[in-house]
Amino acid sequence: MDPMTSDVIAPSPWTIFGCQNGLRLFKEAKDRGSHGKWDDHPAIMAVGVVDGTSEAIFQTLMSLGPSRSEWDFCFYKGNVVEHLDGHTDIVHKQLYRDWLPWGMKRRDLLLRRYWRREDDGTYVILYHSVIHKKCPPQRGYVRACLKSGGYVVSPVNQGKQSVVKHMLAIDWKFWRSYLQTSSARSITIRMLGRVAALRELFRAKLGNYPSSDFSSGELTSNVRLPQSEQDVKTEAQTLTEEKTEEDVEDREVDKTPSEHASLVGLNDAADEFFDVPEQSDYDLAENGWPSDFGSEMYSQDIRHPKLSTAAGFVKKLHDLAIQKRGYMDLQEVAREDCIPCCYGATLPKDPTCNLACSWTEADPSTFLIRGKNYLEDQQKVKAKGTLMKMVAADWLRSDKREDDLGGRPESIVQKYAAQGGPEFFFIVNIQVPGSTTYSLALYYMMNTPVEDSPLLESFIKGDDAYRNSRFKLIPYISKGSWIVKQSVGKKACLVGQALEINYFHGKNYLELGIDIGSSTVARGVVSLVLGYLNNLVIEMTFLIQANTPEELPEYLLGTCRLNHLDASKSVLVKP
């Protein structure tokens, strides 16, 4: 646990298994039931120290131009297919053949690339495979599937050096009888060796890499590196041998709204950047995606069988296309007749954490909060408990944003109010917009008078500006893909500074409606999370930031653990 970048105490998900070329090599730790065995496409990470600033290294990693040939021995040529917004794009990379095992066909990758900069100067670049109508599978190449991957570049030594973490979980798409699983791991480990090449590049340049090599044109242009005579002959031979062979279709439909997309409608043709390939375009016998790919890249539990024609798959994508882009990976939900909804009872509780699509409270000691002397020593301490108890949760869907759930007559809040008891509810309603809007509402209750907690009382009675400056969330993905964990992070954030929060105050409750759609960045992160939703265990806690000695130490309002949420099990709200 890195105290500088985390407000969560959690065990490392990585186990070291070797050191090669000055890089430490790690594999992702598995659950107890796996008995330490590696799966077919394990997540592997290389870690090394590079003599360069995090910004310079970030620019080098982002470049697809000629400068990449100075360190990336895997990369043949690449280009940006489409810019989605200021921090997301689609990139196509073709790989050299000579570093792959003898007889292995050329590989290429079509990736959604997302990047961001943390407050401490850390850069995060995340990748995963997608499908895009502007870049269909190409002759002579087998399109590999990057399930999860990317870089984390963190400054050390006053920013003069950087720790570079490079992670890959990749399916190379070969005949199982042709290359064994160990060979696939060897290819991935060899590719991770690029970090050592990057280190040597910066060592040779003494950290003074020319900024001209990282011009914006290099990031956007389609740059083709010159091929050697042998490369030309090899490629020509490959094309001749494989002229009737086509690559497999990607199973993933990209999910992030474009920079100019509105929140209301995203159904115009220009905004739909996926296409549906014809069955005749593919050789499913050789290049078919294995069934285990579905569980990683789709949010569905359902495994899609291979179809004799493309009709079923075409219909599925057509149905998804009418939904707001960014949430197409959510399972198509049967639209049953609307039934009355008892707010506070739609998501079941399961303290054992064995039931899918359920909730329970998380361990408060997982989270770090400001201690009594924080203003002097900047130290955070383990939380010892919570002010409130989580009593209920809702997992809803609707064709519009659902606000003020606590004020509705059929709500658990109003049932307590009718009894005239002292209970006070604090409701966090996380709203994910789209043609179908999903709402995750968490209900916290306290039996003691609000006046006994002055900071909470100030928050309840304060104006929106005060509340926005104090309400904090600490997220933690305790089980899930590396790409999701890196995207979400484990750092406390002031939600009201990044997202729009609508407050609803009743006699015995305060409800916070957090609109995810109010931020392009948050919308992109959540769309990524939704794509892996069925495979995630999400933990989080809420608190009010303490800024003065009188308010310290901080305390948690409440915690939550969400176990493998399923969009198909959300409850349709009655109009």
Image (cartoon, rainbow, N blue to C red):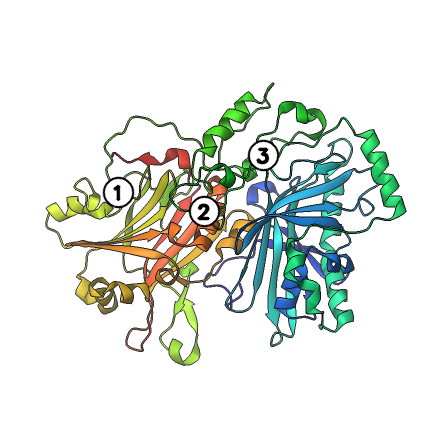
The numbered dot on residue 344 is: 1
Q: Which element is circle 1 on? A: loop
Vertical relation: 68 (above or below) 128: below
> Residue 278: x, y in percent?
62, 25
Vertical relation: 192 (above or below) 552: above
Q: Quadrant of residue 575?
A: top left
Q: Name the residue at the bottom extreme.
A: 376
- Amino acid type at circle 2 is Ala
Q: Nearer the viewer, residue 446 or 186?
A: 186
**Mark whose residue sits in front, 1 or 2:** 2
Residue drawn at the location 28% of the way across and 77% of the way down: 550
Q: Which residue is mark 2?
A: 261
Structural distance between the alpha carbons of marks 2 and 3 = 24 Å
> Residue 545: x, y in percent?
34, 67
Q: Which element is circle 2 on? A: loop
Q: Which residue is mark 3?
A: 251
Q: Which element is circle 3 on? A: loop
- Amino acid type at circle 1 is Gly
